[in-house]
Image: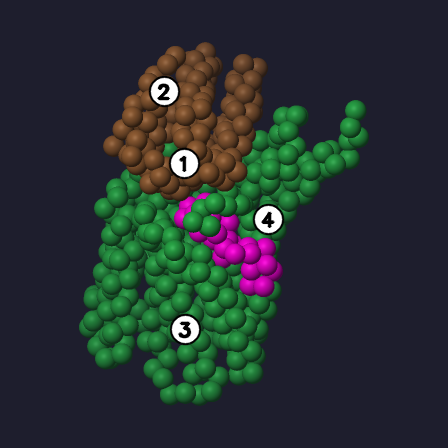
Chain colours: A brown, B green
Amino acid sequence: MTIRDFLATDHRHCDDLFAAAEQSANAGDLAAAGASFGQFRAAMLRHFATEEQTLFPAFEARTGMSMGPTQVMRMEHGQMRELMDAAAGALQAGNTDDFFGQTETLLIMMQQHNMKEENVLYPMCDQHLADGSAALIERLRSELKEV
Amino acid sequence: MQALLSFDQSPPLTAPLRFLLTAPLYGVLAGALLMIEGADLLASRWTPAALAATHLLTLGFMLQIMLGALIQILPVVAGANLAQPARLAALVHPLLNLGCLLLVAGFLAAAPGLLQAAGVLLLLSIGGFLFAAARALLHVPSTSPTIRGLKLALSGLLVTAALGLVLLLALSRGWSLPLMPLTDLHAGWGLAGWTGILLSAVAYVVVPMFQLTPGYSARSGWAFPWLIIFPLLLWSLAFWCDWVWLAAISQFSLALVGIAFCLLTLRLQSQRRRPRPDVTLHYWQLGLGSLISALLMLLTAAIWPALSQLPMWSPLFGVLVLVGGFIAFINGMLYKIAPFLAWLHLQNRGSSGGSLPAMNKFLSEAEMRQQMRVFFAAFGLLTAACLWPEALARPAGLVFMLANAGLGWNLWRVVRRYRRFCLPVNTVPAV
């Protein structure tokens, strides 16, 4: 398994949770939507954290690129954190229209971010971190499992 | 490597935006031309007005937006950074527009000088873009069907433009070339080799992304562009050797491949997990349905060529492919691209602190829906006008004008709101 495959699978897992939250919100079941969105947000935050604390530092240490792609990915994580806060807020306030406005933005942000990671950054990680990739993936896996 | 280091660099907002904002004007012009010419425009595909209208739509609207959007997405989907996107846009955009207007004027006035001048300008703009894109893509390995598709689509654009140039020279200098089959080949490369492959390459990314559908299978993704290029090469060979039967077989296969792609996309969209069908999805559904109808016409005509001699045949095919097909896709996608770009750039200006307006604050669903209704009406009228040109050509032109004016107005709304949202950041004094 490559780093790309492993983390791309986690992206799809987050997509699933996102879809569940939107479907509940559309059906008017705001309690269920809140619960699903909470699960989605937790999964996203775990994904961001494991990248920022484990994968990116390993990549930066190996390549010496600390202001390159990883810096941008961190910035985009910040933007998505804000969008998720806003969407959760809209849901709490019972404002479905605002919720869908925020999730629309979040979805595109998230997907174009995933695309850059899956097409550019992860393949670079696979290339530069090939020697220790099995151990690294194990570590990512254990971090993603934490609740 | 250098490209990868800066793969974040989103080009400045003006680079893609100038293309997106100009394009609807050409839709308005095409509608106006139909209003002025009336039924005559739909009488044959070879009249000066029909040639002018076709290029208003294909160059002025479609190519314009495709180039603007590529400047934006090449770094994101392919990690291919154009060296100086703002400068490239500032060069390609005026040349393309001037070239397109001169070409249209050249057709309408039957003026060889204008046609040749248009040829030079279009050569410079399309050639310049292709050069910059090729330089950016040269060292990017084709690791995904989308990247492979982008490269092959750009090759399709190269062939289309080269054939167009030959046609221009033949027309304006009176070269004795078989103009009609050559025009068919030019249209084939432009519609299938450039636009069709680009649409599919973009679809692999945006269909799952906007609607959370399952992805296209990797096998179909890799195979599709070649299944288009191969028949196009056979068709080109058929033209060269004057083998009408081979040209017919090529067109038949192109139609089959295109229909397969459309059906596959419809199936994926039926499995979407986003609960609310939005304007973009409706535009896609119109586009796919209309494209399937056009390709069925192509399929039928490859078996019974006499059908294509019917007076309404070519105009109807053109309306289905261009208006109901590609322009509908583009219109739908613009409604995602423009608000998202505005949001992204507002975000990147560092206006944190307050809560940023979401995408639907730049353009609301209701505003998009209103324009979409007019566009659907225009498409219906244009289709009917191919059957009853005397009665319907002018009303169809008017409504098509309105639909494009509505699109332009909506895109301007996005820009105006972007500017308004920018203001507080700059004007509110620090406390």
| Disc 4 packing (10 Å; few <14; some 14–19; many ≥20) | few
Q: Where is residue B2 in the image (x, y as percent from the top left)?
A: 46, 50
> On the image, numbered disc 4 is attached to which residue?
B12
Q: Which residue is drawn at 79% across and 24% down?
A: B431
Q: Where is residue B403 in the image (x, y as percent from the top left)?
A: 55, 51
The CA distance from mark 3 to mark 4 is: 30 Å
Judge depth for marks 3 and 4 and give the one in front: 4
Q: Where is residue B325 in the image (x, y as percent from the top left)?
A: 40, 53
Judge depth for marks 2 and 3 and give the one in front: 2
Instruction: Provide the major secondary structure of the magenta segment.
Output: helix
> On the image, numbered disc 1 is attached to which residue?
A62
The CA distance from mark 2 to mark 1 is: 23 Å
Q: Residue at x 23, y 80 (%)?
A: B241
> On the image, numbered disc 2 is attached to which residue?
A144
The CA distance from mark 2 to mark 3 is: 53 Å
Amino acid on which the number 3 mark rests in the picture: Ala
Q: Which residue is drawn at 37% across and 69% down?
A: B159
Residue B88 magenta? yes
Amino acid on which the number 4 mark rests in the picture: Pro
Query: Is B36 situated above or below A65?
Result: below
Disc marking residue B205? none
Q: What element carries label 3?
A: helix
Query: Is B180 situated above or below A38?
Result: below
Q: Is mark 1 on a helix, strand or loop?
A: helix
Q: Which of B402 and B40 is in front in this view?
A: B402
Label 4 with label 1: CB-CB less than 8 Å: no
Judge depth for marks 4 and 1 and give the one in front: 1
Marks 3 and 4 on same chain: yes
Marks 1 and 3 on same chain: no
